[in-house]
Amino acid sequence: MWAAIVAGACGDEGSGSSDGTEGTSGVTTSTAEPGSTSLESTTGVVEPTTETGASSGDTGDEDACAAFCAAVVACAPDVVVADCIEAFCGDEGADPACVAATDARHTCLASMSCDDILVFLDEEEPGPCSEAVAQEVEICTGQKACDYEANGAVDGSACSIDFECIGEPPQTMQCDTETCNCIEDGSTTGSCASEQICASWTDLESVQFLVELAATCCSFGPAA
């Protein structure tokens, strides 16, 4: 998403991507980040839209989002500030808590060093602003800020879902026809009955069942 601005100047429940290999298939998605607009869809990233949350609604030169865009331009001079403002600053809602959280995220991002800003643009890693991004997502969407990827056997005999949530260690739920095991940072933390959940999960809608089971079985993922 952010890299699209730089790429364009120098001349990623939303969407998702899926791929397959013999005997397995996979779906990758993430919790949408509110208060911004997608310029480009990238494999493995659900791009946020103006329908997923709220931002300040004030696109003047002194607002938090415009300050972030000014910082982006200072670090990447080929970016046009008006394009950044048009893409990421707008009136998407009026919930005061979400507005405040979105402005806090923009303020934090604007304060980052150029090195951190360029990493954020290229890799969508918020670095020192991870907590601000996580708080915004939770306040505006009611979920944790997580990326997740599901894989498994096409015959439904086994499946798994991996989570990368801001501020938490790597988490995985691995299931077969009888049991799902919860694994956090390499250690098993619990288990539950799988209820044959792997029998149908190969698209974004059915993967949501894995997300929901991981929340109740393991306390993992955006819905936990």
Image (cartoon, rainbow, N blue to C red):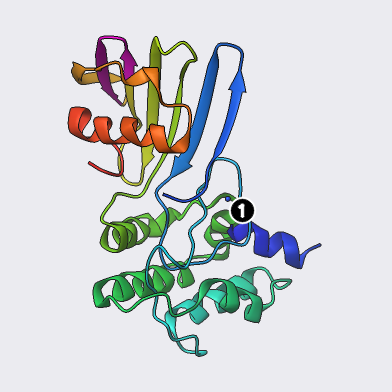
Quarter placement of the N terminus = bottom right
The structure residue drawn at horizontal position 37% and vertical position 18%, both measured from the top left corner, is 198
Q: Quadrant of the C terminus?
A: top left
| 75 in the magenta segment | no
Q: Give the number of marks.
A: 1
Estimate the x, y position of residue 163 in percent, counting from the top left.
37, 34
Q: Is residue 177 found inside the magenta-colored segment of the image? A: yes
- The residue lying toward the viewer, choosing from 215 and 185, is 215
At label 1, the amino acid type is Asp
Above-or-below relation of 211 to 34 = above
Query: Where residue 96 sits: x, y (%)?
Result: 26, 78
Residue sitting at 38 percent across and 21 percent down?
A: 160
Q: Is residue 150 above or below residue 2?
A: above
Q: Is residue 159 above or below residue 96?
A: above
Residue 196 lies, in percent from the top left, at 30, 15
208 to the left or right of 121: left
Q: Main secondary structure of the magenta part?
A: strand
Q: Secondary structure at mark 1?
A: helix
99 sits left or right of 7 in the view: left
Segment tinted magenta in the rendering: 174-184
Residue 180 point in image, percent of width and height: 26, 17
**Residue identified by numbered label 1:** 122
